[in-house]
Amino acid sequence: MSHERLTTGSEVPCGVYRCNACAKQIDVQEDKTKLPQCSACGGFAWRTKRECKISDSTQQSR
Ligand SMILES: [Zn+2]
């Protein structure tokens, strides 16, 4: 349940995504960006490496 399988054309929130086939990482800057085809290997399968969480962007402690 922790690993979502994503494919090219899926709308994803901003974050870092990794190609399942070649481990290339892409940076998604905007919400609801459709995942591209992997530019390195032409793969269609991605997994979430890291999500940027907008809801908690204000840092109060520290
Ligand atoms: Zn790839």
Image (cartoon, rainbow, N blue to C red):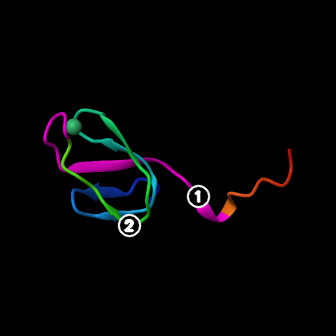
Residue 54 appears at what percent x and percent y? 60, 61
Residue displayed at 16% across by 44% down: 43
Question: Residue at 24% of width from left, 32% of height from top?
Answer: 22
The quarter holding residue 34 reads: bottom left
Judged from this view, the residue extending furthest toward the right is 61
The crowd level at tag 1 (other Cα within 10 Å; few <14, some 14-19, many 20+) is few
Q: Please tell me in which quarter of the rendered image ligand 1 is found.
A: top left
Left or right: residue 9 compared with residue 18: left
* Quadrant of the image occupied by residue 8: bottom left
Give the quarter of the figure containing the C terminus. top right
Please state if 21 lies on the left or on the right of 29 as rendered: left
The part of the chain drawn in magenta is 39-55
Give the spatial CA distance, label 2 vs label 1: 14 Å
Marks 2,1: beta carbons within 8 A:
no
Q: Please name the amino acid that badge 2 sits on.
A: Lys
Which residue is found at the position 20% from the left and 43% from the top? Answer: 38
Q: Quadrant of the N terminus?
A: bottom left
How far across and down, in percent of the image, does residue 47 sit? 35, 49
Identify the mark at residue 53; answer none if there is no mark.
1
* Label number found at residue 32: 2
Query: What amino acid is found at the position of numbered circle 1 in the picture?
Result: Lys
Is 50 magenta? The answer is yes
- On whether residue 6 falls in the magenta region, the answer is no
Residue 9 image position (x, y, % from top left): 22, 62
